[in-house]
Amino acid sequence: MTEYDDRRPTTGGLTAAIVASAAVGVLAVGVALYGPPGLGALGFGTAEPAPSGASAPAVSAPAYATEEYGRRLLAHTAELLGQDQPNPGLRYINSRLNCGSCHLATGTEPGTLTLLQTDEHYPRFSGRAGGMTDIEDRINECMQRSMNGRLLPMDSPEMFAMASYLRSLGTQYQAMGASSLKAKEPAPFKTPVRAAEVAMGQLVYSTRCGICHGSDGLGLLATEDPGQGYLFPPLWGSDSFNNGAGMHRVLTAARFIKARMPLGEPTLTDGEAFDVAAFINSKPRPEMTDLERDYPDKSAKPIDNPYGPYADDFPLEQHRFGSFQPIDEYYKALKKK
């Protein structure tokens, strides 16, 4: 079977195949290449609205919900599931980010935010959810927060494909040689013993980050068509992640920045990564509703969680930008009790 461009409209090709022959064999080829009829210009997905639900039903995956489709969804999320998707039923995200904006090389690059060992980590307990979660739950957390969108139906081809792709990476990880598994990253980020300085972060941003992400932080589009997403993603504004995303936490962002940025030349100091993370997260972005429901056990909230309520009396500003040592010491003492 030859490779094809999953972003090219394919409805016409499928219709021609059906008209040309009603033979089962020909139709099967058409489905394998393009997906079944009625699925929109991209030939994948469902036009049904997203139902709520906490776990995936025991149903069979459609033939076209492949690992390769899952990989493409991570690489081209904005185009395939975004607000400019021709099929309204597939418009699941309101940002124009791709999963690969943070999970570099669609998660196959070892190191920070790799997805190679995802299957080993689930199911697991989530303090934010207050219960056990699996890979599908985690995908939907990202859909709602990092992608500023809505839940994928648990029985949708998109959910099947993305979860299948993530699970397949475990096999890929086991097949990789030792040298390939070593992350090409600097020493891990260490939290400075001070509050982050937003003004210093702005200086770091202007000298080290703005050349790719734009002086206005709104990113660099891949093409003149916004529907095809960004070459370098927006770090704030309407097309970026919302305030419920993990990357909106200063320490989480600083760890990623120290490990990966500037892309191909991660040379920022701990202080620079800390300050520029604070600057980025001081900027306006979409807001998620009902965040007070997160972390039923408030003492399980990360110390840099940027929204309350908290199980402590430290001010919101300190939870956002530090200093974090007093908060950390408070919770360590609380656990000992």
Image: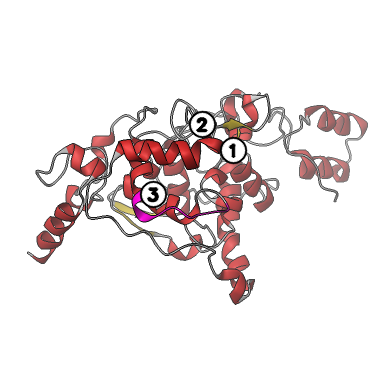
Q: Position of residue 54 (x, y in %)?
A: 40, 45
At 68% from the left edge and 29% from the top edge, which residue is drawn? 223
Q: Foreground mark, 3 or 2? A: 3
The question of residue 324 being in magenta is answered with no
At 84% from the left edge and 31% from the top edge, which residue is drawn? 13
Q: Amino acid at mark 3?
A: Ala
The quadrant of the picture occupied by the C terminus is: bottom left
Coloration of the structure image:
secondary structure
Q: Quadrant of residue 231?
A: top right
Residue 77 image label: 1
Q: Amino acid at mark 2?
A: Ile
Callout 1–callout 3 Cβ contact below 8 Å: no
Q: Position of residue 101 (x, y in %)?
A: 54, 43
Q: Which residue is mark 2?
A: 93
Residue 214 image label: none
Question: Is residue 182 rendered to the left or right of residue 42?
Answer: left
Q: Which residue is mark 3?
A: 273
Q: Label 3, secondary structure: give it.
A: helix
The first of marks 1 and 2 along the sequence is 1
Q: Label 1, secondary structure: give it.
A: helix
The first of marks 1 and 3 along the sequence is 1
Q: Which residues are magenta?
A: 264-273
Q: Is residue 39 above or below residue 65?
A: above
Callout 1–callout 2 Cβ contact below 8 Å: yes
The question of residue 271 being in magenta is answered with yes
Q: Amino acid at mark 1?
A: Thr
Question: Is residue 85 rendered to the left or right of residue 199?
Answer: right
Q: Is residue 254 above or below residue 248?
A: below
At 59% from the left edge and 61% from the top edge, which residue is drawn? 169
